[in-house]
Image (cartoon, rainbow, N blue to C red):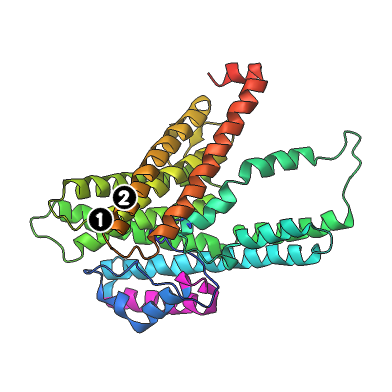
Amino acid sequence: MSTPSTSTAPKSSSGMNSNAEEVEDTAYSSPGAPSITNDPRFRAGRKLVVNGKADKGAVGFFATLVEESRRKYGDSGIEAAPCYYEYGNAIFRAEVKQRGQLDDDVNDMDEDTKPAAKVKNNDIASPSSSSVVRSAAAEAAERRMAVASEETKKKSEEGNKDGTSNSTPKDEKEESHVSAKSKLKESDDTSLALELMENAWSILDQYVSQDASSCEQQPYMDWASSQLPRTLTGIGDVLSDLDRHADATDAYTRALAHRERAVEDLIKSPSSDTGLRMLAARRHHVEANILVAEELLACPADNDVTTTETGDVLAKASERIEYARGYYDKARDSLQEAVFLMGRVAAAGTELGTEKEDVCYLATMVMGVGTALAEFDDNVDDNPAKKLKTR
């Protein structure tokens, strides 16, 4: 899920940074978090994750902490929730990085035949080489936006009607790497990551729900409430990575409800010291909206957007694009608010930290969705039959 700032990347929920410069971890900087988040191993694991080194020991740290927290606090103890989530988060990030390395292998094989500019662009797009702190969602976004074009490419590369094959040795090498990446995607580790994140969400949700019906406030209420959208975003990232785009849409939509509430609460706040907090809240609001839009665009064109487990229809096939357009419009408007607020906060002399980079990266995500929608409109204009079908 960014660190949201889980965050991507998405996005989203915290980024993968392989540069020497280390990134500050803000996911557990707020007061009120369970004491286990101050454990040196927890801090070390988080430091590895936010700096793109989840495969360098973070998984082991969190695996140990999960077992210890379960023994000490019980399987469903609120103190175990951050360990569950970060264990799944580390597993997922480590696998994403491994697939990125497979991409690098493909680039290395073909570097003599690829144009120099294309190689350069691949380097820039690689999550492991980016210096921008991205959320898990933002990382996943780079894959999501390519789904439609990949499907089109697959169709165009089908064999001739007579059954002859057009493959070349180069194609076979690339297919072997794609196959390896698919196996990684569908591995037991990815399923385990999803299960762990869902365990964390279940604990947090139950904790917050119980507190709402109780006369006595629980000690971790504020922290748990702030972690719900981050956890949902992380779950959405994994579901998107597994090509379960309808389920990812559902997760991101539920995270969006929390993000909207956070903005509304700050608007109503009597405190004048809300500039930087409001900027972060606006950024998260942009992120949640654009992630929903991306997932809707990634869903199969001829099917209703239906969740796997409950069978809920989130959008009819004929309405999918317009739903995506609605979330895009909200993201664009909220981004304008964030940019304006960022200028005002900076003018007041407040240090922006990584907010400027995060907002700028979100701007590229919003532009990407806007471009995808514009291309869809062009295709509809060129195909009157399709235009009738979508209305």
Q: Which residues are magenta?
A: 49-72
The Cα–Cα distance between marks 1 and 2, rounded to whole angstroms, is: 8 Å
Q: Are marks 1 and 2 in contact (CB under 8 Å)?
A: yes
**Residue nearest the viewer, comparing 249 with 193:** 249
On the question of residue 312 being in view, the answer is no
User: Which residue is identified by label 1?
Assistant: 275
Which residue is found at the position 59% from the left and 67% from the top?
129
Q: Is residue 226 above or below residue 380?
A: below
> Residue 306's spot in the image, x, y percent?
48, 36
Q: Main secondary structure of the magenta part?
A: helix
Of mark 1 and mark 2, the one earlier in the sequence is 1
Q: Quadrant of the N terminus?
A: bottom left
Name which residue type carries label 2: Leu
User: Which residue is identified by label 2?
Assistant: 341
Task: Assign a secondary structure to mark 1.
Answer: helix
Q: Residue furthest bottom?
A: 40
